[in-house]
C-alpha cells in the first residue's frame, strides 16, 4: 500500500515508521524543507528517542505526491489542517483512503478536523465523488508507537467500509485498531482532552497530588460527555479509548506537552511563556476558544474548561480556580452527570 | 462529633488525621496492641510520610469504645471486615453512623463490604432498629489525605439521610464529598479496580508503555461496567469518581500496592513472592476469585480479569496473556461495550 503522511512532526514520523514496519510504501510530505532535510539526514526525529527512520521511507516537498497514494494521512498540527487539505485537494481522488491524526476544533467554525478535511477536499466535487475522512484517535504517545510498543486506537467514520479499510491498513501486529461510527464524539474527545490535560498539569504544578488529578480527570470527562450528549454524540464514545483512554495517557504522562504546559502555568508562568518553554504546539490552548464557545452555544455547564480559560486568558490565579472547583456545592454525582 | 476508626492501617490513620483536623473527637481502635503502641509512641505511621498524628487522637484496644461514638468507620483490610463487624456489633446502636472504607468482595459469598457489615450488625435486630452502612470511596491515596491535599470522594448509600450525614461529617474543607445511591456499583468498582491495577502493573512490569496501560485501563473499565450492568448497577457509577477516578489513581501511581505487586509479577515474580515483597495486603488478589465467580455467574466476558487469574493462579506467562488481549479479533468499540 502506498501511503503519504502529510506532516513531519512526532506523530507523523511515528506513524510513518509503524506503517513502514507493516509493509506500506511510505512517503513523508512536509511544507518545511528544513524539516525534511533534517529527517532525511539524521534518520531520526529529535522527540522520538531511540527510533530510527528506515531508509525505505521517502520524503517529498511537493504535495503532488498525494496523487499516487492509496492512503493519505493528515498529521499536521490542527491549525494547519485546513490549509494542508486545501493544498492537497487537487491531487486527491475517489478510491483513496483519507485519514486524520490531528486533534482539535477550529476556533471560528467549531469544525472538527475530519469535517474541515472533507469540506476542503470535496469543494466542487460531485456528490458521487465525495471523499470521506476517517479519524484515527486513541491513547497513543507517538514515542511508544515509534518503538513498536503495544497500542490500541480507534478508526472512526460513519462509512463502515472506510473505517474497516483503515483498521486493516494500520492493524497488525502491535497496533490494535477498534472501529467506531461516532466520528464527532471521537473528535470532540480528541480536542477537549487536551484542555483537561492542561488542567491536570496546572493542578500538579500548584503542588496538588494524584487524588486531585484523578478527581479532575474524572470530573473533566463528565464535562466532556455532557457537551457531547448535548451535541448528539454517543456518550459511550467518551468512556472509550478515544475519550477517557486518551485523556489518561495525556494527563498522566510527561510525554504530553499539554500536561507539561499546564504544569508550568500552575507554577506561575503565563500561557505564552509556557508555550515558549515547551517549544511545541500546545493543542489544548488552540482548542480552548472553541470549547468555551460550544459550552455557551449548547448551554452546557463546563466549570473546568471555564476555569482554564480564566487562568489562560484573564490571568486568574490557578490556586483560586482549583479551590473554587473543589468547593462548589457538593452534590449527587450521578444526578449531576445526568443534567446538562 | 465522636468518631471511632476501626483499623490502624494507612487509610484508617489518614482518615483519623483528616477528621481530627475538621473537629471530630477521634479514637483509633485496632485488634493489634503492637500497632496501637507504635502509633501512640511515634505519632506517625511508617507509610504516611510527613504526616503527624496529633496528640488529641486517642487509641483503644477495647472495641467497646464503639458504644460511645456518633460515627464508626471501618478501615480494616477487606478480609477482616466480617470479624471486625461481628466484634463491634454488640456495642453499636441505632442513630450511629456506620461508614465503610474497605474495598473488596468476599470470595465465598460475593458480598460487598457494606453488605457484610449490615448483615453482621443487624443479626437479631428488629427491622425498625436496622442499621445502614455508608460506603465511602473514590480516588484517594491515604498519603495525600493525611497531608491535607485536595481530594474528592463519594458517600454512597440508598439511604439519603445517611449518605448526606456522612457527606456533612467528612466534607470541609479539602475533602469534597459527592453522594450516590448506587452502593453496589460503588463497591464493585472499589473491589474490581484493584484487579485492573494489578493488570496495569503487570503490563508495566513487562516493559510496555503508557499507551498499553491506558488501553488496559479503558478496556478494564468497560469490563467492570459490563459486570455492573449485568448485576443491575447504574452504569454511570463506573464512569465516576469511584470507578474510573479510583482506577486512574490506583493504576497510575506507585503509591498503590496493587500496581506495585503487578509490576513485580510482570517482571517474573510469582504472586506470593510479590505479596511478600510489597509487605502489605494486596486487595486485588483477594478480590480476584469473587470477580471470576461473578463473571461466570452472570455470563459476562471479562478477558482482563481472566487473564490476571491465569497469571496469578496458573502461572501463565504475563507477556503471552497481554499479547492475547492485544490480538483478540478487532471490533467495533461501542458495540462491544454494549454487549454483555
Image: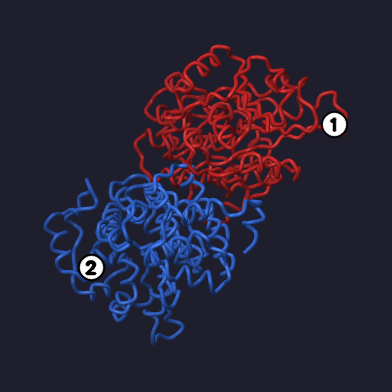
Chain colours: A blue, B red
Q: Position of residue B91 (x, y in %)?
A: 76, 21
| Left or right position of A100 against A340 | left
Q: Position of residue B119 (x, y in %)?
A: 77, 28
Between A334 and A264, the one nearer to me in the picture: A264
Residue at image position (45%, 62%) is A192
How crowded pointer 2 is (Cα within 10 Å; few <14, some 14-19, many 20+) is rated as many
Above-or-below relation of A81 to A225:
below
The chain that hosts pointer 2 is A
Residue at image position (57%, 57%) is A236
Between B106 and B340, the one nearer to me in the picture: B106
Q: Position of residue B24 (x, y in %)?
A: 63, 33
Residue at image position (42%, 20%) is B277
Q: How many discs appear?
A: 2
Residue bearing mark 1:
B129
Q: Is residue A146 visible?
A: yes
> Marks 1 and 2: which is nearer the front?
1
Residue bearing mark 2:
A29
How crowded pointer 1 is (Cα within 10 Å; few <14, some 14-19, many 20+) is rated as few
| Left or right position of B240 against B200 | right
**Residue B75, quarter of picture:** top right
Q: Quadrant of the N terminus of chain B?
A: top right
Between B173 and B240, the one nearer to me in the picture: B173
Helix, strand or loop for disc 2: strand
The chain that hosts pointer 1 is B
| Left or right position of A110 against A87 | right
Amino acid at each position: 500500500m502506498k501511503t503519504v503522511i502529510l506532516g513531519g512532526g512526532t506523530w507523523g514520523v511515528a506513524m510513518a515508521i509503524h506503517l513502514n514496519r507493516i509493509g506500506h510504501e511510505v512517503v513523508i510530505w512536509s511544507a518545511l524543507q528544513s524539516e525534511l532535510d533534517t529527517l532525511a539526514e539524521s534518520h531520526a526525529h529529535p522527540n522520538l528517542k531511540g527510533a530510527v527512520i528506515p531508509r525505505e521511507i521517502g520524503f517529498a516537498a511537493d504535495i503532488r505526491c498525494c496523487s499516487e497514494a492509496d492512503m493519505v494521512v493528515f498529521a499536521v498540527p490542527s491549525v494547519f489542517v485546513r490549509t494542508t487539505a486545501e493544498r492537497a485537494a487537487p491531487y486527491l481522488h475517489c478510491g483513496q483512503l483519507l485519514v486524520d491524526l490531528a486533534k482539535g476544533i477550529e476556533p471560528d467554525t467549531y469544525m472538527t478536523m475530519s469535517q474541515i478535511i472533507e469540506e476542503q477536499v470535496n469543494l466542487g466535487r460531485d456528490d458521487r465523488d465525495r471523499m470521506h475522512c476517517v479519524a484515527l484517535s486513541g491513547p497513543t504517545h507517538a514515542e511508544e508507537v515509534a518503538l513498536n510498543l503495544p497500542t490500541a486506537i480507534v478508526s472512526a467514520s460513519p462509512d463502515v467500509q472506510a473505517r474497516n479499510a483503515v483498521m486493516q491498513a494500520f492493524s497488525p501486529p502491535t497496533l490494535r485498531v477498534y472501529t467506531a461510527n461516532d466520528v464527532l464524539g471521537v473528535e470532540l474527545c480528541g480536542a477537549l482532552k487536551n484542555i483537561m490535560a492542561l488542567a491536570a498539569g496546572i493542578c500538579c504544578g500548584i503542588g496538588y497530588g494524584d487524588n486531585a488529578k484523578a478527581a479532575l480527570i474524572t470530573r473533566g470527562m463528565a464535562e466532556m460527555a455532557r457537551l457531547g450528549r448535548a451535541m448528539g454524540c454517543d456518550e459511550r464514545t467518551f468512556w472509550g479509548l478515544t475519550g477517557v483512554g486518551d485523556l489518561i495517557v495525556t494527563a498522566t504522562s510527561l510525554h504530553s506537552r499539554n500536561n507539561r504546559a499546564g504544569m508550568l502555568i500552575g507554577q506561575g508562568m503565563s500561557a505564552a511563556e509556557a508555550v515558549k518553554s515547551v517549544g511545541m504546539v500546545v493543542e489544548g490552548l488552540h482548542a480552548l476558544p472553541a470549547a468555551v464557545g460550544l459550552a455557551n452555544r449548547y448551554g452546557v455547564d463546563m466549570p473546568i474548561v471555564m476555569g482554564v480559560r480564566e487562568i489562560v486568558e484573564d490571568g486568574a490565579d490557578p490556586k483560586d480556580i482549583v479551590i473554587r472547583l473543589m468547593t462548589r456545592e457538593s452534590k449527587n454525582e450521578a444526578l449531576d452527570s445526568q443534567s446538562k
